[in-house]
Structures are given as structure tokens and as C-alpha cells.
Amino acid sequence: MALVEDHQEDPWWESKTIVASLILGLPVVGLASLGALSLIGVDTSVFPAMFSVEFFVTDLSLRLLTLPIGVILIRAFIRSMTNN
């Protein structure tokens, strides 16, 4: 007897990789942007504090610390919204 697999895709919020990418996206993009600007010769030390490397590194480390809780909370919140 052959088992028939259901090829139904899960919603995007069920993918831990996508949710983690959304949570970590901003600081990674910010650090990459500052790195690219530094490579082409822009003096990034004159940028306001909200665009500094320290800000993005701090943001990334806080997001990494809270990532498991964030993934669980986001998935639970979206599941509750789709059930209503």
C-alpha cells in the first residue's frame, strides 16, 4: 500500500527560516550598507548615532538573544489571527 503525500505548502510564517530572516534582516542590511559605504570611501563616522556600526551590532546581538522567543511569539500571533 503506497502512502500518498500531500504537497500542500505551509504558510510563510510556518517557516522558521523566513521568520528568522525577517527578525534579523534590518541589522544585517545596516551593517552591510555601512561596510559597502566604507569600501567606496564614504566617511561613516560623521553619520548620526542611529546609523552607526555600534547601533547595528547592538541591535543584532539583542535580536539574536531574543530570536527563539520572537519566532515563537510571531508564529503564535499569526496563527491566532488566521484562526479568527
Image (tube, helix red, strand yellow):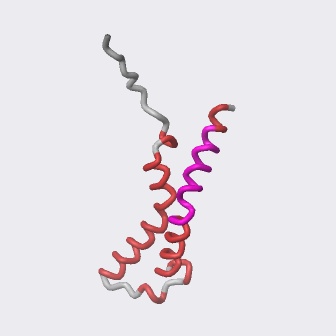
- Nearest the viewer among 38 and 77 is 77
Quarter holding the N terminus is: top left
- Nearest the viewer among 72 and 20 is 72
Q: Residue at coordinates 53% horizontally, 76% vertically from top-left?
A: 58
Q: Residue at coordinates 36% horizontally, 17% vertically from top-left?
A: 4
- Nearest the viewer among 50 and 67 is 67
Residue 74 falls left or right of residue 40: right
Instruction: Report the residue that reaches farthest toward the front.
Output: 1
The quadrant where residue 5 appears:
top left
Residue 63 falls left or right of residue 7: right
Give the percent coordinates (x, y) of residue 62. 55, 69
Quarter holding the C terminus is: top right
Give the percent coordinates (x, y) of residue 52. 49, 81
- 65 versus 20 height, above or below: below
Instruction: Report the residue that reaches farthest toward the top.
Output: 1
Determine the main secondary structure of the stretch shown in magenta: helix
- 29 versus 2 height, above or below: below
- 61 versus 43 height, above or below: above
- 27 versus 74 height, above or below: below
Instruction: Report the residue that reaches farthest toward the right.
Output: 84
Residue 52 falls left or right of residue 72: left
Q: Is residue 51 magenta?
A: no
- Nearest the viewer among 34 and 78 is 78
The quadrant where residue 43 appears:
bottom left
Q: Which residues are magenta?
A: 64-79
The quadrant where residue 2 appears:
top left
Q: Is residue 75 magenta?
A: yes
Give the percent coordinates (x, y) of residue 75. 57, 45
Q: Residue at coordinates 45% horizontally, 88% vertically from top-left?
A: 45
Q: Residue at coordinates 49% horizontally, 36% vertically from top-left?
A: 11
